[in-house]
Image: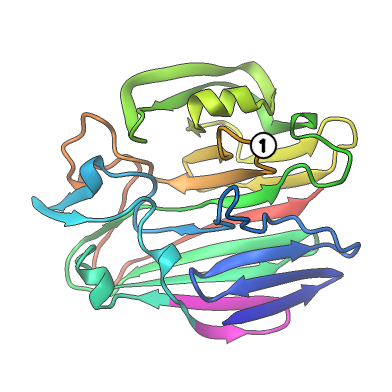
């Protein structure tokens, strides 16, 4: 089921499968969200829940009991139910079911609210522990933006610009997509930006930063300044990804609360980095915002 939103010349499409906002067009008709061409990557804007990234051997432990879960969790593969809608926003909900309980043994409510704003959109997550035991989870977004946006531009014409200068290292991954416990590489040296470079993504796969001073970052054309800005306040990590080994015309801006398993971790979910644990009846709200530049 798809929902169409419109506000002040902006139009968006939201798909109940995965709870994703899958299209955003401005008043001139420019599309900002990647179209999911499987020749490069079939994703568009997947919701990452209840894990972010890969697990060691595809398994995680809950109180010592092993459960299998694929990369980025199961929410992106399931159908959400509509809760409410008007012209500019829609709320969708995912709850536990037999398919989720064999992977993640907790009753829960996950609501996602997509809202068109004056200059873009916001996506709000509301996670509720509806069970009777403490519930751990991680959550994130994987929003893919077309890059370049316009004919005649190149991927390398764009850059990533933070709100403030940063001293930051990127977290390194193993070939299996796990976080290296001993691996960091300097990325920002008192600067607020780095240029897009396919060779860097081919080598690192994903650029992953945590605990920045900035709460916003932009993907901008270096000459014209057009692009998008991500406000990720409330998320301790932000990542950047594009498909390596090809000329994929998109970049993902990804606010994360959690990340892939560390290569030397014990596998217990409650011990995962940036994991959130809710007591019975507790609710956690998180929101990221996109502004067109």
In the displayed structure image, the side of residue 121 where residue 236 appears, left or right: left
In the displayed structure image, the side of residue 165 where residue 77 appears, left or right: left
Magenta-colored segment: predominant secondary structure = strand
Please, which residue is most extreme toward the left here? 64
Q: Quadrant of the N terminus?
A: bottom right
Based on the picture, tell me whether residue 84 belongs to the magenta stretch. yes
Residue at 49% across, 26% down: 204
Q: Position of residue 174 (x, y in %)?
A: 35, 28
Q: In this view of the protein, can residue 63 be seen by the observer?
A: no
Secondary element under disc 1, as helix, strand or loop, is loop
- The residue carrying mark 1 is 247
Q: Position of residue 284 (x, y in %)?
A: 40, 62
Residue at 45% across, 63% down: 76
Q: Which residues are magenta?
A: 82-93
Please, which residue is most extreme toward the front here? 39
Quarter of the rendering containing residue 268: top left
Q: Position of residue 36 (x, y in %)?
A: 61, 57
Front residue of 81 and 205:
205
Quarter of the rendering containing residue 287: bottom right
**Crowd class of label 1 (few under 14; some 14 to 19; many from 20; radius 10 Å):** few
Q: In this view of the protein, can residue 247 be seen by the observer?
A: yes
| Image vertical order of residue 144 relative to residue 83, above or below | above
């Amino acid at each position: 089921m798809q929902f169409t939103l419109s506000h002040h010349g902006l139009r968006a499409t939201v798909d109940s499968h995965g709870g994703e906002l899958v299209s955003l067009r401005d008043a001139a008709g420019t599309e900002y969200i990647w179209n999911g061409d499987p020749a490069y990557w079939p994703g568009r804007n997947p919701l990452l829940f209840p894990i972010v990234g890969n697990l060691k051997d595809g398994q995680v432990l809950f109180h010592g009991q092993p459960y299998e879960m694929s990369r980025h969790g199961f929410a992106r593969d399931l159908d959400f139910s509509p809760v409410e809608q008007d012209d500019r926003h829609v709320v969708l909900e995912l709850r536990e079911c037999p398919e989720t309980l064999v992977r993640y043994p907790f009753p829960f409510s996950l609501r996602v609210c997509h809202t068109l704003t004056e200059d873009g959109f916001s996506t709000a997550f509301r996670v509720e522990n509806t069970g009777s035991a403490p519930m751990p989870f991680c959550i994130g977004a994987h929003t893919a933006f077309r890059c370049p946006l316009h004919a005649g531009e190149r991927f390398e014409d764009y850059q990533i610009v933070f709100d403030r200068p940063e001293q930051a290292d990127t977290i390194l991954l193993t070939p299996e997509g796990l976080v290296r416990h001993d691996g960091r590489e300097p990325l920002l040296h008192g600067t607020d930006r780095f240029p897009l470079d396919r060779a860097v993504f081919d080598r690192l796969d994903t650029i992953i930063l945590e605990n920045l001073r900035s709460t916003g970052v932009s993907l901008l054309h270096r000459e014209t300044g057009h692009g998008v800005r991500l406000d990720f306040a409330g998320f301790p990590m932000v990542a950047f990804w594009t498909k390596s080994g090809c000329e994929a015309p998109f970049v993902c801006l990804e606010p994360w609360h959690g990340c892939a398993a560390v290569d030397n971790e014990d596998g217990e979910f409650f011990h995962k980095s940036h994991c959130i644990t809710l007591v019975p009846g507790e609710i956690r709200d998180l929101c990221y915002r996109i502004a067109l530049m």
